[in-house]
Amino acid sequence: MKNKAVILGCNYYVGLSIIRCLGRNGIHTVAVDYSEESRYGAKSKYCKEKHIAPHYKENQKGLLNFLIEYAKKQDAKPVLYPGADPYVEFIDTYFHELKEHYLFPMDKKGLWTEVMDKYTMSLLANKFGVKVPETINSKEDNLIERVREEIKYPCIIKPMDSASFVKAYRRKVFIVQSEEELKEKVEMCHRDKHGIVIQRIIPGPEENCYCYDAYLNQDSKVTHYTSAYKLRQWPNNFGASTYAKQSWIPELHQICKPFLEGIGFKGFSEIELKRDINTGVIYLIEVNVRTINFNQMLEKVGLNFPLIAYLEMTDKIPPNKSVEYETGYVFHYMYEDLFAIKGYLKSGQMSLGKLLRDNTTKKVHSTWAWDDPMPGLYFMSTIGGKVVRRALGKE
C-alpha cells in the first residue's frame, strides 16, 4: 500500500495500538514523537519508521514544517493519526495546511475542538436533545449562587482542555465539597489560565459508565459501531478505563447515532456516558475524537477503527459492520489498574470477591502482545526502573 500511516505520539499505548492495528494489515507505519523517552510504541515490530520532531506545543510551527516536508517526500499522501488530545488540537489549529499534504477523515476545521471543549460540547448536546449533567461555565456571573441552587455539593470541576489540566494538576477533575473549596479551586484554575466548568456528579457505580464507539463515513453516517462499559478506572470514579468490557447497550446507539450524525462528525469517535442510578437517565459526559485506550480490544471484537479510517481515506471503502452482542472481551491496563484496585478496596467501593468475579481470561492488554513483545518488555523495564529508583530514594 503506497500511503504510509503517520502516528503522532507513540510514547503511550494508544499510539502503540494504532501501529499494531495498521501494521498487522501490512500498512507502513511511521512513529513521530518529540523525545525518545518512554517511546515504547516505536519499539513495535510493526513500526517501519520512527522520527523525532519538534514539540507540539513548544514549537508548533517547527512540527508543522517537519510534517509538511516529510509528506512532500512521499509517493502518496500519508494518512495522519493523532495519538493524544494535544495532537488533535495541533491538527485542528493547522487544519488546512495539513489537509493539503495528509489524509484524515474530518473535513471541517474547528469541529474537533468544539466537541472536545466540555462547555461547547454541552451546548451541542442540548441542541440535539441529548442530556448532559447540569453544567456552568466558571466565567458565568453569580457562579457561587448558581452552583448552590442548580448543581449543589458535592460537584466536580472539569477542564475544557483535559491534557493541560492533567499535566498541571495530575488529575482529570476536582471533586468539590463546599463553597469555600469551590472558590479556592476556581481562583487557582483561573490564575493558571485553565478553562473550566462546574458540573453535577451523576450518581452510580463504575458499571454505569458507558462508552459508545463509532466510525462515521464521509457522509457523516455511522457505519461501524459497538459499545462497552467500565468496570474500573483510574483515578477512581473520574478517570480513564483500566478494566473495561465490551457489551452491547442498545440505548447508547439510539442516543449517540443521531447526535454524531447531526453535528456532521466524520471519522472515529467515542462518546462516554453515565446512567443515573436513581432515575435511570443516561447522560453524555464527554466526547473523544481520536483513538481511545481500549482500541486493541475493539480490534479483537472485529472493529479495527484505525484500519477502517485508512481504507476509507485511500478509497478502499470497508463494508459496514456493528457488534451488537457481548463478546466477553475485556481491556486491561495492569499498571494503573493496580492503583485503581487499591483505591476501590480502601474506599470500600469494591470487595475482593467482586474483583475476583470480574476477572476473565479474555483479556486484551494495553501494551503486552504475544506477537509483538518488545513494547511490553520495554514498558515493564521502565516501570521496574522507577520502582528501584524510588526504593533507593533517587526519585
Image (cartoon, grey):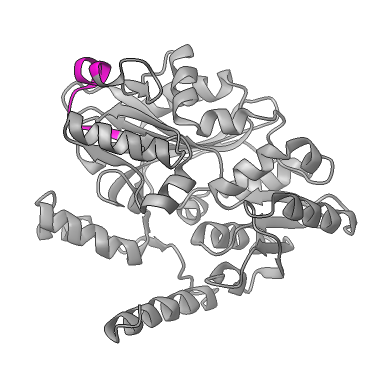
Residue 350 lies, in percent from the top left, at 13, 52
Asked if residue 147 lies left or right of residue 92, the reply is left
Above/below status of 335 relative to 279 = below
Asked if residue 368 lies left or right of residue 91, the reply is left
Above/below status of 214 relative to 131 = below
Of residues 240 and 303, the one nearer the viewer is 240
Residue 171 lies, in percent from the top left, at 34, 50
* Residue 293 can be seen, yes or no: yes
The residues colored magenta run 145-156
Of residues 355 and 375, the one nearer the viewer is 375
Residue at left offset 64%, top offset 63%: 33
Residue at left offset 50%, top offset 19%: 124
Asked if residue 19 lies left or right of residue 239, the reply is right
* Residue 316 can be seen, yes or no: no
Asked if residue 243 lies left or right of residue 60, the reply is left
Of residues 97 and 170, the one nearer the viewer is 170
Was residue 35 drawn as part of the magenta stretch in this picture?
A: no
In the rendered image, the quadrant that contains the N terminus is bottom right
Residue 140 lies, in percent from the top left, at 38, 18
Snapshot quadrant of residue 362? bottom left
Above/below status of 11 relative to 235 = below
In the rendered image, the quadrant that contains the C terminus is bottom left
Residue at left offset 57%, top offset 22%: 261
